[in-house]
């Protein structure tokens, strides 16, 4: 009885999680915050300014920068990120994603994008995937980011579907929390120990197929 699928973008559809992370790593080096795996995971799914705050907080630097300096750091990060995005092609779509999107389309599922990124439309364009999504949530219109349910709840509304009729797919802990809080069934992509709050976890996007999802529900 699932009728719609709501996707996160970075780290689910495209390998841009890596590009965001590389660009933030440079910011961390600039301000003198040690770049760790755990910090990198904490930033996933989190908005630009909140990500910057987390990097500054990691070395108690939040009060060393005024608002204008913070805006500049975030602006530079975005410039760096966009430079990387301009080099993207279809090769940057994660394995199996395009065929999964195609099978969802063939089977008449509604498809929506729920990304915290203000650059998501550009990434979809560069990878040639824009046409799959009838609905894209505009993160600038939201009052709260992930883990708040607002973004996934809004996506379900745009699809005109009850949350129970949707699936949400995420690679970030904050994203899984947002999906769950919206009463949508959550699918995690990545490490099951990290994404242990998800309804199902697939280790990678290649395992994300309609038949694998169906067989999970059949076993229940
Ligand atoms: C999320 C990414 O999708 O978007 C984060 O997981 C990123 O890493 C956030 O910081 C905001 O993106 P942007 O492109 O608006 O700076
Ligand atoms: Mg993500």
Image (cartoon, helix red, strand yellow):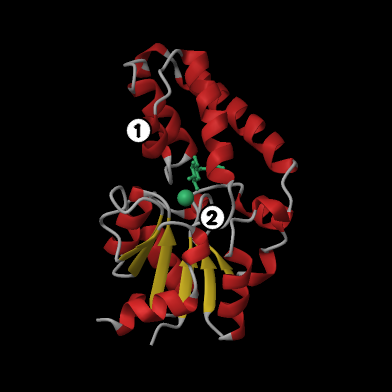
Locate residue 68, reporting x and y percent: 52, 20
Locate residue 191, reporting x and y percent: 36, 50
Query: Ligand 1 closer than 8 Å to the CB at disc 2?
Result: yes
Of circles 2 and 1, the one toward us is 1
Location of the C terminus by quadrant is bottom left
Considering only order in the chain, which callout, 1 or 2, is on the residue closer to the N terminus? 2
Q: Is residue 144 visible?
A: no
Locate residue 174, reporting x and y percent: 34, 49
* Residue denoted by label 1: 38
Q: Residue at x 54, y 47 (%)?
A: 117
Quarter of the view holding residue 154: bottom left
Frontmost residue, 134 versus 216 = 216
Q: Which mark is residue 9?
A: 2
Q: Is residue 1 left or right of residue 106?
A: left
Locate residue 192, reporting x and y percent: 31, 54
Frontmost residue, 140 versus 114 = 114
């Amino acid at each position: 009885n699932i009728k719609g699928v709501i996707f996160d973008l970075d780290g689910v559809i495209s390998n841009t999680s890596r590009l965001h992370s590389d660009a933030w790593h440079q910011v961390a080096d600039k301000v003198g915050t040690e770049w760790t795996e755990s910090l990198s995971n904490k930033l996933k799914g989190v908005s630009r300014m909140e990500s910057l705050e987390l990097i500054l907080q990691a070395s108690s630097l939040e009060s060393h920068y005024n608002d204008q300096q913070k805006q500049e750091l975030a602006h530079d990060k975005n410039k760096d990120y966009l430079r990387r995005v301009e080099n993207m092609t279809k090769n940057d779509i994660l394995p199996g994603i395009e065929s999964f999107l195609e099978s969802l389309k063939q089977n008449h599922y509604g498809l929506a994008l729920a990304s915290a990124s203000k650059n998501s439309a550009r990434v979809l364009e560069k990878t040639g995937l824009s046409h799959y999504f009838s609905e894209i949530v505009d993160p600038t219109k939201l009052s709260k980011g992930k883990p708040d349910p607002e973004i996934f709840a809004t996506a379900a509304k745009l699809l005109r579907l009850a949350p129970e009729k949707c699936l949400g797919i995420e690679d970030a802990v904050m994203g899984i929390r947002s999906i769950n809080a919206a009463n949508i069934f959550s699918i995690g992509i990545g490490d099951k120990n990290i994404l242990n709050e998800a309804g199902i976890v697939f280790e990678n996007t290649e395992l994300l197929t309609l038949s694998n999802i169906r067989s999970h529900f059949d076993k229940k």
